[in-house]
Image: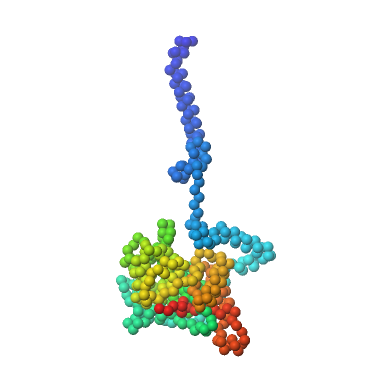
Amino acid sequence: MGKLLKRYKLLILTMLFTAALLIGLGYFFAEKQSEPEFASKIDRMMFERKNKSPKFIITLPDAATRRAEILGQKTQDELNEQNQEQSENSLDKGFSAAELAAKIPLTAKLTPIANPVALNPLDIVPGLSEEVNGMVLPKISDNGQKPWVEYGKTENVQPNFYKVAIVLKNLGMDSMITTAAIETMPANMSLSFSPYGRDLNIAVRHAREFGHETYVDWLLCSKNFLKADSGPMAMSITQNKEENLRRAEASLNVRAPIGGMVVNNGIADETVAEHLQVIMTDMQKRGLLMIDATGEDGIDKVNIPGLARRKADIVIDTQFVRNDIDEQLKQAEIIAKNNGSVLIAATPKPVVLHALKDWVETFSPQLTYEQMKEQQTTPEKPLVLVPVSNLVVE
């Protein structure tokens, strides 16, 4: 027996080694199959090798939530919860499906203005433009006429009433929204068009046919430029001053009556101060009006003597919930009564258009002191909608 074992010793050892190897490989692959799948090396580092339990978990808020926290605004989750509560309350009150559908703010529900009165001129005034590198740009005429004055209009306001100016921005991208803003909003509501819009010369003429003052958006570099590019017409922190000036002038190349530029929110700090200085100086030399619709203070810090400018007191471009918009409009009434006037800049979402039109329709008719005395009445809302140029004094 001993001789037999010695004879087959090598064979037995080989078989035992092979069996051990197979068992080891089976255990290894079973272990690998039970591991979680990792999207990256960072994910793998967050797990123990033995029990697969997390070492640590990092939770980063999304950009919208973080911004809302900083500004003290409602997060999207809170807004969703609020909307849910409103829907439940509506159902509890016994609203029918038709009644609920009637509450949806569609642009098709907005009533067009009857018998609109055009704001002349409908086309560029001779002498108020020049050709630069193939672009037709506004300029001050030889006799001193300025585009922002010549393309604007004046609304007479009784001394006991307060001025309200509203400018809708980012128009020209969505044809339905643009048409609704032009044809259904009051004539004294000013309109500003995105430089990326199609056939802007036609859109601007259409707007002026319905009595609106017309402007174009000036796009700053996006604050989230690593994820959201504002496009080739926007100011860029990676370009020189000459290129950023060219982009701003390209935005003005609408070939239609443009009174100035509405500045959209973006990077406007000390890193781009010199670029802002160059572009705003160019606006001043061209006789344009600049409306600061950023909702922040960066543009305020750039001083350009002689530039016609006005900063929006209320900016509606983030929270598109009717209750929130109504609250902002109530705040606008307070500002108007305290300061004599208020400027609102808004992104024209359907709910915004409905809220603005409903609000303006609550303004009291203008009455003189003599008429109020004769009628023995006091206006409930002594507010008057005026074009944005009416709030500006150089």
Q: Position of residue 127 (x, y in %)?
A: 34, 81
Residue 159 location in percent, x, y?
Answer: 52, 84
Compared to residue 118, the image places residue 32 above or below, namely: above
Vertical comparison of 197 with 224: above or below: below
Q: Residue, x 45% and y 72% (percent of image)?
A: 311
| Extreme-front residue of the structure | 338
Q: Is residue 33 visible?
A: no
Question: What residue sits 57% from the left and 80% below the top?
Answer: 364
* Total numbered labels: 0
The chosen color scheme is rainbow
Q: Please tell me whether residue 374 is drawn above or below residue 64 in the rendered image.
A: below
Q: Nearer the viewer, residue 198 or 118?
A: 118
Q: Nearer the viewer, residue 156 or 201?
A: 156
Can residue 342 be seen here? yes
- Could you tell me which quadrant the C terminus lies in? bottom left
Residue 377 or 114: which is nearer the viewer? 377
Residue at x 52%, y 74% (from the top left corner): 335
Query: Where is residue 21 drawn, in percent x and y?
Result: 46, 27
Instruction: Give x and y (percent) for residue 352.
Output: 53, 69
Q: Is residue 88 left or right of residue 170?
A: right
The residue at 45%/15% (across/down) is 8
